[in-house]
Amino acid sequence: MPSLSAADARPDPKPELTIGFLLMRQFTLASVAGLVESLRFAADESFSSRQIFCRWEWMTCDDQPVTASCGLPVSPTAPLDFTREWDYFVVAGGLLEETRQPPAWLLQALRDLHARNIPIITLCSGAFVAGNAGLLDNRHCAIHFTTREEFSARFPKAIPVIDKTYIKDGGIISCPGGTAIDLAADLIRHHCGVVRSQKVLKYLLVDEPAASKKAVPKTAVAEGNVYENALVNRVIEYMRHHLDTPVPLSDVAEFAGLTFRQLNLTFTKCTGCSAAVYWRRMRLEQARKLMADSSRSINEIAAATGFADASHLIAWFRKQYGETPSSFRKRRRKVEKLLND
């Protein structure tokens, strides 16, 4: 039996983006297709539609095929699973008859997802499902202009907006419909880098969207999560402004007016991880963006993101993403070459 080479034996790198799609009956096809087609181009080194760097699953409420509002039947690719560590969970709505009165178990499942700090994306009338779950109370949400009157009547605590392509507020990303291209572009930009986002749009024959100019303050994907705890948000902003400085966490605790233990307890309760882990993930995310969008050396990137040296960055990068910075950049060069050919 032939032995495996080191490359063959090496496990696949961790996907940069994983999304679970819950397709409601009579969902709107356009927004779902715009989002997933963008992911498809970002998911593979070539254009073979392999789910390597981005992965997604189609799911339904009863694990049975559903029919889109245009009449297209779609079969699920996986059983409905709320327990996975999705990067995003999409509720794809469409005709209001299917989203006005969602089942109680679904509403509780979405509340549990939200409590685990997994961002929930609502497409089209999926906002009605999130509204029924109480997840849009006192939050801005982007809805279709034709549903504004009913939405406001049903969810008086929500703040509906009808002139945005998407809004992120409090861990809920609402998209009123259309092709969802602005949202898809920013998700790819945030997780996969600016170059891939721009090249994907080029192949989709779409002009670079100006979502960052259209979104209301603190709602763009790239700005990260906004939590309900004002102190945590203030500390995260402090961390963001000190990404290039190896500030000890004790200084962060002092800035927050808390002890080291109190800071970690507060972060764990609000974000699901300690302040130290959260800050390291911010640094690693920034490092990955610099690797994707610049030619700076690993030493320079380590210095720019607060790591002690290149070895320190490489070790944590491999642990977080399942590959080294050099292999990450190698894949980027392959993708860019294919897209530029």
Image (cartoon, rainbow, N blue to C red):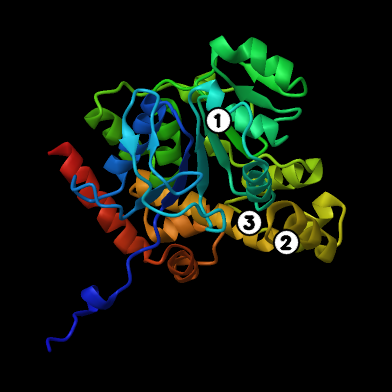
Which residue is identified by label 2?
A: 249
Give the residue type at disc 1. Answer: Gly
Residue located at (67% from left, 49% from top)? 239
Q: In this image, 30 relative to 110: left or right?
A: left
| Camera-nearest residue between 315 and 33 | 33
- Position of the N terminus, as image quadrant, is bottom left
- Distance from the alpha carbon under mark 1 to that under mark 2: 40 Å
Q: Is residue 240 above or below residue 162?
A: below
Which residue is identified by label 1?
A: 126
Residue located at (44% from left, 28% from top)? 26
- Distance from the alpha carbon under mark 3 to that under mark 2: 9 Å
Numbered disc in front, either 3 or 2: 3
| Numbered badge on residue 279 | 3
Residue 173, x across and y down, in percent: 57, 33
Give the residue type at disc 2. Answer: Leu
Q: Are the residues at dot 3 and dot 2 in contact (C-beta closer than 8 Å)?
A: yes
Residue 84, x across and y down, in percent: 52, 58
| Camera-nearest residue between 309 and 91 | 91
Q: SS at mark 3?
A: helix
Give the residue type at disc 3. Answer: Trp
Residue 112, x across and y down, in percent: 67, 50
Is residue 168 shown to the viewer in this render? no
Crowd around label 2: few <14 · some 14–19 · many ≥20 (10 Å): some
Number of callouts:
3
Dot 3 or dot 1, earlier in sequence? 1
Q: Are the residues at dot 3 and dot 1 in contact (C-beta closer than 8 Å)?
A: no
Residue 248, x across and y down, in percent: 71, 62
Residue located at (42% from left, 48% from top)? 290
Numbered disc in front, either 3 or 1: 1
